[in-house]
């Protein structure tokens, strides 16, 4: 008679015995197999079976050597960032034009050259047109210069350590053990090491606003902190989501006010301070519970338009699974659908070619890939809000890598128990790097949405 495997119970029966009858035999007679009808996840006892009483010691549950992960450990925030070698500890940036100010649009107004260097809004007839044979260093042709500043970043060290005893490693090889314990733990710790770096990359701003968390600066600088603005943080203070200093200056805690050595985002007398460090942030009219907005195509389109006006080109939209579903529902209700785009992988300027085995398909909005992130925060106080959206121009945003991820191990299995100080072994994953950004106005964020 031909027997078919239709269910997981059939597969277990074919693998471990009892396919139509009890197939595992012991000296005392037939012993109930793994499919004997007892609960898999309960305490199994063979007492009282047809084989006779007191035979529970003859039965051994079979777990198998494979360890299945029941945890989502995706690392999309870390993966979407370009990786560059850490070649410098800072960079110089131009913060203002010689004339015309620092906004995306060239500033025109009524300021004459006689006003000296304060030429944020010059007269329309005094922006460079001069007479024939015009005298140098005279009215209409004074010396002007851009304004510059410097930013710096320090590499951060991310490390995770684990231990396992010599006995545990040996016992795992016998009975129904997992086999190579070292290999198993190393693989799972490597996943954790990558996942934690992704969690750092989307750490909520609120977590920086705790005096007891001053060591948070040891982590990678979060994208939520990079893509932020003084006005956004003032709105969060107004909604009691962040705390301002009780002094007359009303400044933010250092972890929030400073980024890359610059504190121009800090509040002044509890008011925001516009800065070249500000990104494009759309949080609505405020962060109070009643100010949460419905996500609309207008919000998405306005953000893309504003970033492009600033000179940015969004390369990826990073958000949560809930927000991607909201966008899909939004477009479907209007009889429009998320496009699918083939992404060709690149590495250090070397681009792959289109082919059957190259590239992968992702949802896009206006040809910008939508990348899901399980750890994406949802900023705001509304109870029905969904995850924030980060619009990232990765031409100017990257992970600077000083030391790529490395694995180190020592211990008794390597002939050096004195190195770890115990009759066991110790492993360590370590990465050194930091997130860098050279164009803040080209990065955007939509928050406080539902």
Image (cartoon, rainbow, N blue to C red):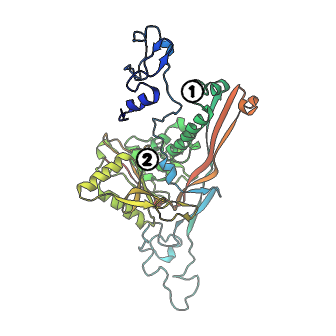
Residue 116 vs residue 105, the one in the foreground: 105
Q: How crowded is mark 1: few (under 14 residues within 10 Å), some or many (20 or more)?
A: some
- Residue 156 seen: no
Q: Where is residue 109 drawn, in percent x and y?
A: 41, 73
Q: Where is residue 193 drawn, in percent x and y?
A: 56, 41
Q: Distance between the residues labelled 2 and 1?
A: 35 Å
Whether 345 is drawn above or below 98: the answer is above
Residue 430 vs residue 20, the one in the foreground: 20
Secondary-structure class at tag 1? loop
Whether 344 is drawn above or below 403: the answer is below
Q: Where is residue 259 drawn, in percent x and y?
A: 54, 51
Q: Where is residue 45 drawn, in percent x and y?
A: 43, 14
Query: What residue is shown with label 2?
Result: 373
Whether 374 is drawn above or below 394: the answer is above
- Contact check, label 2 and label 1, Cβ < 8 Å: no
Query: What residue is shown with label 1?
Result: 177
Q: Earlier in the sequence, mark 2 or mark 1?
A: 1
Secondary-structure class at tag 2? loop
């Amino acid at each position: 008679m031909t027997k078919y495997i239709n269910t997981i119970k059939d597969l277990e029966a074919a693998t471990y015995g009892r396919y139509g009858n009890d197939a595992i035999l012991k000296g005392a007679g037939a012993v109930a197999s793994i499919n004997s009808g007892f609960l898999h996840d309960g305490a199994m006892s063979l007492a009282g079976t047809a084989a006779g009483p007191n035979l529970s010691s003859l039965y051994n549950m079979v777990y198998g050597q494979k360890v299945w992960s029941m945890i989502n450990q995706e690392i999309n925030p870390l993966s979407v960032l370009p990786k560059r070698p850490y070649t410098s500890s800072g960079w110089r940036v131009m913060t203002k034009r010689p004339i015309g100010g620092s906004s995306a649009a060239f500033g025109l107004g009524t300021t004459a050259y006689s006003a000296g260097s304060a030429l944020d809004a010059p007269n329309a007839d005094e922006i460079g047109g001069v007479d024939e044979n015009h005298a140098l260093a005279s009215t209409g042709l004074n010396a002007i210069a851009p304004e510059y500043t410097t930013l710096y970043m320090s590499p951060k060290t991310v490390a995770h350590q684990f231990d396992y005893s010599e006995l545990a490693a040996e016992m795992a090889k016998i009975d129904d053990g997992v086999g190579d314990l070292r290999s198993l733990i190393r693989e799972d710790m490597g996943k954790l090491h990558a996942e934690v770096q992704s969690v750092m990359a989307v750490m909520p701003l609120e977590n920086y606003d705790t005096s007891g968390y001053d060591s948070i600066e040891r982590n990678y600088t979060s994208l939520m902190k990079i893509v932020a603005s003084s006005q956004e943080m003032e709105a969060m203070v107004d909604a009691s989501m962040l705390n301002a200093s009780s002094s007359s200056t009303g400044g933010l805690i250092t972890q929030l006010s400073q980024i890359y050595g610059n504190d121009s985002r800090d509040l002044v007398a509890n008011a925001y301070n516009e800065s070249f460090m500000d990104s494009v942030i759309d949080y609505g009219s405020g962060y109070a519970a009643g100010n949460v907005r419905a996500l609309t195509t207008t919000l998405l389109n306005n953000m893309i338009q504003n970033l492009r006006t600033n000179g940015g080109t969004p390369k990826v939209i990073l958000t949560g699974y809930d927000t991607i579903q909201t966008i899909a529902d939004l477009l479907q209700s209007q009889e429009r659908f998320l496009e699918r785009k083939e992404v060709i992988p690149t590495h250090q300027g070397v681009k792959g070619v289109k082919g059957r085995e190259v590239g992968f398909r992702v949802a896009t909005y206006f040809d910008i890939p939508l990348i899901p992130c399980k750890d994406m925060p949802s900023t705001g106080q509304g109870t029905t809000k969904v995850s924030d959206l980060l619009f990232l121009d990765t031409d100017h945003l990257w992970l600077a890598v000083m030391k790529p991820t490395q694995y180190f191990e020592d211990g008794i299995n390597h002939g050096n128990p004195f190195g770890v100080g115990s009759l066991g072994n110790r492993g360590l994953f370590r990465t050194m790097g930091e997130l860098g950004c050279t164009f803040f106005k080209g990065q955007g964020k939509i928050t406080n949405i539902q």
